[in-house]
Image (cartoon, grey):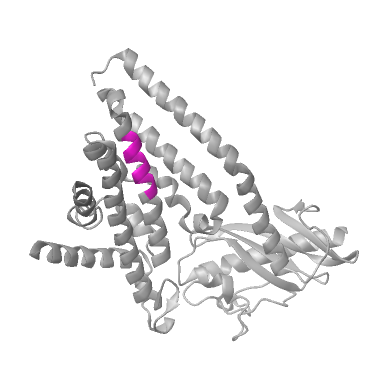
Amino acid sequence: MKALNIIYNGLVKQNPTFVLILGMCPTLGTTSSALTGLSMGLATLFVLICSNVAISALKNFVPDKVRIPAFIIIIASFVTVLQMVMQAWLPALYGALGIFIPLIVVNCILLGRAESFASKNGVIASACDGIGIGLGFTCALTVIGALREFLGTGCIFGAHIYPESYGSLLFVLAPGAFIVLGFLIAIFNRLTNKA
Amino acid sequence: MKSTLGNMILSLGCISAAVGAILAGVNLLTAGPIEESARAASVEAVASVLPPFDNDPQAQAINIDGCEIYPASLNGQAAGAAVKVSTMDGFSGLITLMVGFDTSGCITGYSILEQAETPGLGAKAQEWFRDSTGHRSIIGSTAPLKVAKDGGEIDGITAATITSRAVLNAVNHAREAFNQYNSQS
């Protein structure tokens, strides 16, 4: 039950995109289509679970004063592993996400969860926190990406819903990312405040 | 845990060593496939821009004027070449493309290998310049190219003139390198 609570907490109550407003750079930068948003979310989910587990397992061996460098080394190594694996077996996706994969290292969601959750809780709880926060991030990015793709090009996941010429390109470009994100934050807060 | 100089050095040292070992292992596992997939992408691009050939253009690749040239031949007869060219003039910087020429210098095809142009605008370049609508297509052309806006005859991508210019200039650069190669052989 506790595990489910932690996952729900990350997914909704402390959703990294709509409530904590963390990791805005990849959120705005990679969501020009639903597919890239989803892949970025899944990549972050993978690194987040691995780093949360590793950090909570090592928390008793790391002195307080050097904990941040230790966390960063652990996070950076998982990101590098992910980068090499994607480059080897998913080169097309790696090409689409480009610089945003190595930039997962500086995503403040990862260090934030390491510092505020994984370094104070057990391995299983930390894994659940990684799953919850990671899924919250993935869902948020997929929804933003799908909306931008739909409004901008008339497709969702590349499937045409209405003719492309009726789409407003603004939503695929940077300003559209801010507009969609702003409206989604407003809607999300309205829904969760009521409940 | 209380920090002392000794345990700080020990813990960071141990973590770094362990991480280094893991990364070295993963690198060993993935180095082969990464090289393989880059090579496969290049082979595929060469095949997609040229008429049928039966040699291995990768093995005979030469570099002229900053362009990689992959000569093709069929039954021992020269069958043109694919030219890999890069430009930094795209709207978002680097664009790399592969352009195919037959022996008479006629463009047989092109493929964009790397680009970061705006989705929905400049990113259309992959399909745009082979579209037979209007004066978009560069396939079959034998002369240097320019967009209509600059007084040329090719219709640029709507709302992406910078990308169109960059692509056409890169194609022209590839043509110069190809002509140089053609006059040598």
Q: Is residue A97 above or below residue B8?
A: below
Looking at the image, residue B83 sits to the left or right of residue A175; the answer is right
View extreme (right): residue: B76
Measuring from the top left, give residue B6's x and y in whole percent: 34, 13
| First to last magenta residue range | A46-55
Which residue does the image show at 35% across and 66% down from the upper left? A145
Location of residue A140 by image quarter: bottom left
Locate residue A194, reporting x and y percent. 8, 65
Frontmost residue, A84 versus B64: A84
The image shows residue B51, relative to residue A23, as above or below, that is below
Magenta span has B161?
no
Q: Residue at x 67, y 56 (%)?
A: B40
The residue drawn where x is 42% and y is 65% is A35
Examine the image and state in which quarter residue A54 appears: top left
> Is residue A62 visible in this depiction of the protein?
no
* Residue A86 pos. (x, y %): 51, 51
What residue sits 69% from the left and 76% below the top? B139
Question: Magenta stretch containing residue A48, yes or no?
Answer: yes
Identify the image quadrant of residue B101. bottom right
Quarter of the image where the C terminus of chain B is located: bottom right
Q: Is residue B119 visible?
A: yes
Instruction: Name the one closer to the observer, B115 or B141.
Output: B115
